[in-house]
Amino acid sequence: MLAFPAKDASSYDLDSQIGFRLRLAMQKHTDIFFKNMDLGLTQAQFAAMARLQTTGACSQNQLGRSVGLDTASMVGVIRRLKARKLISIAKNKEDRRRVIIDLTASGRALIAKAIEMGLRANEQTLSPLTLTQRKQLISLLGLLVSGEDEFSRE
């Protein structure tokens, strides 16, 4: 059972720690994701493309923040998606220092297939839970990360 909080090191229960549980859940979901995703997309690439699919073109910084990636990681994601011709990059007309990222036609076609695969992975990850538990879990996780990005859902 969960013991909150540990009084000292001798009563520390690793199994009751949120970080440990989240890491195990993420490992499980990552395994399921890659078993379902046969389009050569990483989770970060999938997230960036899915965000572009739902929100449309946006700045590279905005896209990175909206999917929880730091600048260096986002640069790598953008570089690989551009190399595959899945996104386009254009200078912002109002501010030439900023770049605008958008899906290409082939990117839109690929993300449509990838979203189907992602939904299947999501279903498999959540399969032990009832619909009510699924909604509760997503809501609770939302509370933990609220305010982290401008696209967070309530």
Image (spheres, rainbow, N blue to C red):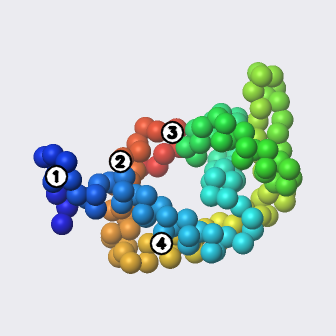
Describe the element under mark 1 as helix, strand or loop.
helix
Is disc 4 in contact with disc 3, using a CB cutoff of under 8 Å?
A: no
Alpha carbon of mark 3 to alpha carbon of mark 2: how far?
12 Å
Describe the element under mark 3 as helix, strand or loop.
loop
Q: Label for residue 82?
A: none
Q: Nearer the viewer, mark 1 or mark 3?
A: 1
Q: Nearer the viewer, mark 4 or mark 3?
A: 4
Q: Amino acid at mark 4?
A: Thr
Q: Where in the figure is residue 107, as x and y percent of width and height?
A: 79, 57
Alpha carbon of mark 4 to alpha carbon of mark 1: how far?
33 Å
Q: Amino acid at mark 2?
A: Leu
Q: Where in the figure is residue 89, as x and y percent of width and height?
A: 82, 39
Which residue corresponds to mark 1? 10
Q: Amino acid at mark 3?
A: Asp
Alpha carbon of mark 1 to alpha carbon of mark 2: how far?
30 Å
Number of residues whose C-alpha sits closer than 10 Å to that of mark 1, classed few (under 14), some (14–19) or many (20 or more): few
Is 112 placed above or below 66 here? below
